Amino acid sequence: MPSRALHEWLILIELGLGAVTFLALLFLAAPYGRHARPGFGPTVPARVGWIIMESPALLAFAWFYSAGPHRLDPVPMLFFGLWLVHYTHRVIVFPLRMRPGQRSMPIVIVMSAIAFNFLNAAVNAPQLSAYGIYPTATLGEPHFWIGLTLFLGGFFANLHADSVLRELRKPGETSYAIPRGGLYEFVASPNYLAEIIEWIGFAIATWSLAGLSFALYTAANLVPRALANLKWYRSTFPDYPSHRKAVFPWVL
Ligand code: NDP
């Protein structure tokens, strides 16, 4: 468990990392999935990469959380439960159900995601079980319910958007197609939009700088990738609907 002073530094580091990540990814799309390309060293199968790189978000988070004095208080347990629901899906269900293309994932991506997930666990788990103040009265606060609604709405929208992509490929297929229906009529990457909404919801529900640092990092990571995805769709499919934005309907 980081000390309170170290925890405050870790939050600042995550905020700074978000700014650096955003600027870097505007110029260089992370080389996995449709943006995979040679020159980034050895690779692992995408499914294995996802399981390994996201695991610290479950395991390290649970370890930090369980070291906190408020680990058995009801509201911290509820927030912990939300985190577990999201990451049990991301670590186990999503990789096992995905229909990855021919490209695999560079180990450098896996390593950098592991490092980030450790940092993020050290930022957000102590916030819940050690340094945040979450009495049962938190359940009567409007920000809790607004945040919870955004989190759950984002979570289910993310599941839906990812399932639309999965259905574009039959088992064994590796090609890409234009996704249609729902939020795909508005943006190229509604799975990213939903993920951003989800973590904004978590930040509002927990009313914390720790939660905000993760929400901002998520946006810093996914908005540039959504822009790259839109550019890729437009250059790959001449009939790609021209009115679709990258990630925020009608805006960007
Ligand atoms: P993508 O949308 O790039 O891909 C998701 C899956 O769908 C991949 O298996 C991909 O195959 C396939 N796919 C994508 N587009 C098509 C298409 N047009 N036709 C057929 N198949 C397609 O998402 P990511 O892999 O970047 O992310 C996966 C999930 O993880 C998302 O829900 C995202 O929100 C979340 N995520 C969260 C992050 C965070 O910072 N919190 C960071 C990164 C991801 P292929 O691999 O062959 O391209």
Image: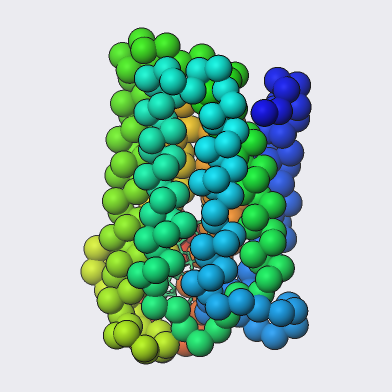
Judge left or right: residue 89 versus residue 104.
left
Residue 164 place in picture, x, y as percent: 29, 70
Residue 30 place in picture, x, y as percent: 63, 69
Query: Which color mode does the image show?
Result: rainbow
The structure residue drawn at horizontal position 59% and vertical position 19%, both measured from the top left corner, is 131
Judge left or right: residue 70 versus residue 155.
right
The structure residue drawn at horizontal position 75% and vertical position 79%, both measured from the top left corner, is 41
- Give the quadrant of residue 42: bottom right
Residue 138 place in picture, x, y as percent: 38, 15
Q: Relative to residue 49, is residue 53 depicted above or below?
A: above
Q: Nearer the viewer, residue 98 or 19?
A: 98
Residue 245 appears in view: no
Q: Nearer the viewer, residue 146 or 8?
A: 8
Q: Relative to residue 226, is residue 155 depicted above or below?
A: above
The structure residue drawn at horizontal position 44% and vertical position 40%, both measured from the top left corner, is 83
Residue 148 place in picture, x, y as percent: 34, 32
Judge left or right: residue 100 versus residue 1.
left
Q: Nearer the viewer, residue 59 or 5?
A: 59
Judge left or right: residue 198 versus residue 69.
left
- For the image shown, how many numbered marks are present on the structure? 0
- Give the quadrant of residue 233: bottom left
Q: Relative to residue 236, is residue 78 depicted above or below?
A: above
Q: Quadrant of the N terminus?
A: top right
Q: Nearer the viewer, residue 123 or 15?
A: 123
Residue 74 appears in view: yes
The structure residue drawn at horizontal position 59% and vertical position 26%, both measured from the top left corner, is 67
- Give the quadrant of residue 197: top left
